[in-house]
Amino acid sequence: MARRTQGTSAGLDRGRIAVAAVALVDRDGLERFGVRRLAQELGVDPMSIYHHIKGKAALLDAMSEAVLAEVVAAVDDDASHHWEEIARRTAHGYRDMAYRHPRVFPLLVTRAQTSPVAISALEELVTAMREAGLPDRTVADAPMVLFSFLNGHLLARTTEEPSAVPAFDAGAYPAMAALTPLMTDFGSLTEFDRMLDTVLTGIKDRATG
């Protein structure tokens, strides 16, 4: 592809650049990602990208915002506004996004998510929790509890190849061996929902305790 000279807009904007960056990382991984490679993909001079996004760190944030916007876009406007349903559909949308973009997903775990799309999603959740009468202490802790689970669980599930549960030596590890039959659904939606139930039940118990 012929490269446009510096200063030629080539129809670039922040959104188009972010989408192209996500596609590039989806294909080649974060370890190979750079502004020059992105510029080659877009057929522009690297400085054309810097005109819209000021540096690689800002570009990584724009990529995070782009994939989070997919989570928001998938939500049905007529869906329930009860806090637990908001948490569940957010969690499921987040999981779907992580599996679509497993090579981009580490950015959401390792970088602070302070974009308007991220904060708006949290605002919807905590507003619903307060309207339901949950204590502010519980509400303040809930996003960290929920996303600590989501990030840890999904990072493990999307960066590791599914593998068989190890055969624990029943003599040395009797408890682990006894539980092995319950660990065979690693990475499944059933496992995810079961663990999500545990998290949400804990939040509800905290609110009423």
Image (cartoon, rainbow, N blue to C red):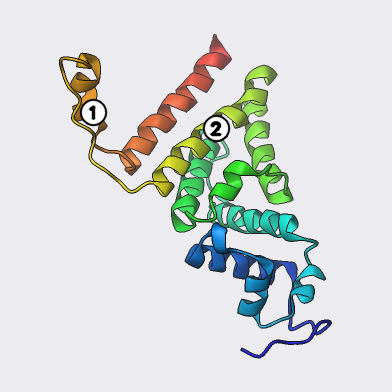
Q: Is residue 133 above or below residue 11?
A: above
Amino acid type, callout 1 = Leu
Residue at figure coordinates x 46%, y 45% from the top left: 92
Reading the image, the residue beneath label 2 is 148
- Percent across and percent down for residue 89 are 49, 43
Task: State left or right for residue 198 relative to residue 49.
Answer: left
> Looking at the image, which residue sits at the far bottom?
2
Q: Residues within 10 Å of mark 2 (few under 14, many from 20)?
A: few
- Percent across and percent down for residue 15 are 69, 67
Q: Secondary structure at mark 1?
A: helix
Task: State left or right for residue 134 relative to residue 52.
Answer: left
**Residue 141 picture quarter:** top right
Residue at figure coordinates x 77%, y 61% from the top left: 55
Give the spatial CA distance, label 1 vs label 2.
23 Å
Q: Is residue 159 above or below residue 55?
A: above
Residue at figure coordinates x 52%, y 39% from the top left: 151
Amino acid type, callout 2 = Ser
Reading the image, the residue beneath label 1 is 182
